[in-house]
Image (tube, grey):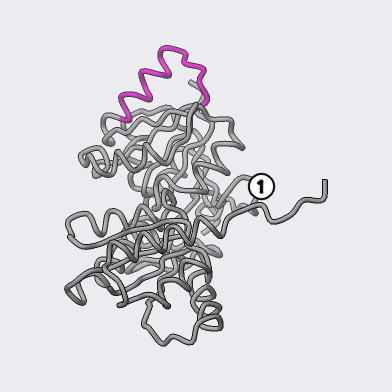
């Protein structure tokens, strides 16, 4: 499949994703993998309204998203796709479920209890750091970059150097 | 009706400061910025603000379908007498400060929206 970007963003679907990332990657399909959103009709309605056509938004729970990504990959799907999850742990879950993800962008990780600023503007707690480390150990490229074209940090490389 | 402005960066704070230069009103209006905040944290702060006092509430956001508008919509989902309007601009804040408490809530919201729309126009062209 043509996974144009696999993005971690705790704001899920919002301006940076819909405008900057979608336009830079040419994504025509957005997949939001989030258990809460997948079980909440209001969130689904709001997020769908935020994505302008012709792009389409699919909302799946984590397991459903992993299944969908595997199916698209096996079918040789060529639609440029932008994947969004809320946390590094969610991305790791998809990778553990054999979703075809080789590169991850930490796009939006904001301040929250227990977090510290690991790179300018990127706040990670212990569990999130551990998930990034495990992604790195699995050979997944991980960068921290708010939007395409902005300064980026090799997050996986940072872990390898520790 | 209590008022809250939720925006990216310092936009809300600056809008209020600028509006107070236009109208000599000390009507309270609170401001939240999404800077450094994820969805859950922003939604939680808005919920806190909403539950602080009973009664009608107005939330003005910059982007209705951006992080501020989405967080406000989710925070207010089970609450009555709460209005969320998007595209907040100086005219809307001035109208809120100037008219708050002087007309029914529904009428005030309509006034704010109409003044906000009227402020967006082509005022000249060089072509």
Looking at the image, the residue that sits furthest to the right is B127
Neighbor class of circle 1 (other Cα within 10 Å; few <14, some 14-19, many 20+) is few
In this orientation, which residue lies closer to the viewer: A73 or B10? B10
Q: Is residue A66 magenta?
A: yes
Drawn side of residue A137 relative to residue A4, left or right: left
In this orientation, which residue lies closer to the viewer: A155 or B88? B88
Residue pictured at 32% horizontal, 69% vertical: A113
Q: Is residue A50 above or below residue A145?
A: above
Q: Chain of mark 1?
A: A
Residue pictured at 51% horizontal, 36% vertical: A5
List x then y, in percent, for residue B56: 22, 69
List x then y, in percent, for residue A38: 25, 37
Looking at the image, the residue that sits furthest to the top is A75
Q: Which residue is mark 1?
A: A149
List x then y, in percent, for residue A154: 58, 50
Q: Quadrant of residue A30?
A: top left
Q: Is residue B21 magenta?
A: no
In this orientation, which residue lies closer to the viewer: A127 or A57? A57
Q: Is residue A74 above or below residue A80?
A: above
Residue pictured at 53% horizontal, 69% vertical: B90
Q: Secondary structure at mark 1?
A: loop
Drawn side of residue A71 relative to residue A109, left or right: left
Segment tinted magenta in the rendering: A65-81
């Amino acid at each position: 499949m043509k996974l144009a970007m696999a993005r971690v963003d705790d704001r899920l679907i919002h301006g940076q994703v819909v405008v900057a990332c979608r336009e830079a990657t040419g994504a025509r399909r957005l997949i939001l993998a989030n258990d809460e959103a997948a079980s909440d009709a209001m969130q689904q309605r709001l997020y769908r309204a935020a994505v302008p056509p012709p792009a389409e938004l699919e909302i799946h729970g984590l397991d459903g998203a992993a299944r969908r990504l595997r199916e698209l990959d096996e079918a040789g799907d060529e639609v440029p796709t932008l994947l969004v999850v809320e946390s590094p742990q969610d991305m790791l879950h998809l990778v553990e479920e054999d979703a075809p993800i080789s590169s991850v962008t930490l796009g939006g990780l904001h301040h929250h209890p227990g977090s510290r600023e690991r790179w300018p503007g990127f706040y990670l707690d212990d569990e999130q750091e551990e998930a990034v480390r495990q992604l790195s150990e699995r050979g997944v490229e991980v960068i921290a970059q708010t939007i395409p074209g902005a300064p980026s940090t090799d997050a996986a490389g940072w872990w390898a150097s520790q | 009706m209590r008022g809250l402005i939720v925006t990216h960066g310092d936009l809300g704070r600056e809008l209020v400061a600028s509006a107070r230069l236009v109208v000599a009103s000390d009507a309270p209006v609170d401001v939240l910025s999404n800077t450094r905040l994820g969805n859950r944290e922003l939604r939680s702060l808005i919920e806190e603000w909403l539950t602080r006092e009973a009664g009608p509430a107005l939330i003005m956001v910059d982007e209705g379908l951006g992080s501020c508008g989405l967080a406000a919509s989710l925070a207010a989902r089970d609450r009555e007498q709460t209005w969320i309007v998007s595209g907040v601009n100086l005219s809307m804040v001035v109208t809120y400060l100037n008219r708050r408490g002087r007309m029914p809530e529904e009428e005030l919201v309509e006034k704010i929206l109409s003044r906000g729309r009227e402020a967006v126009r082509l005022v000249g062209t060089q072509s």
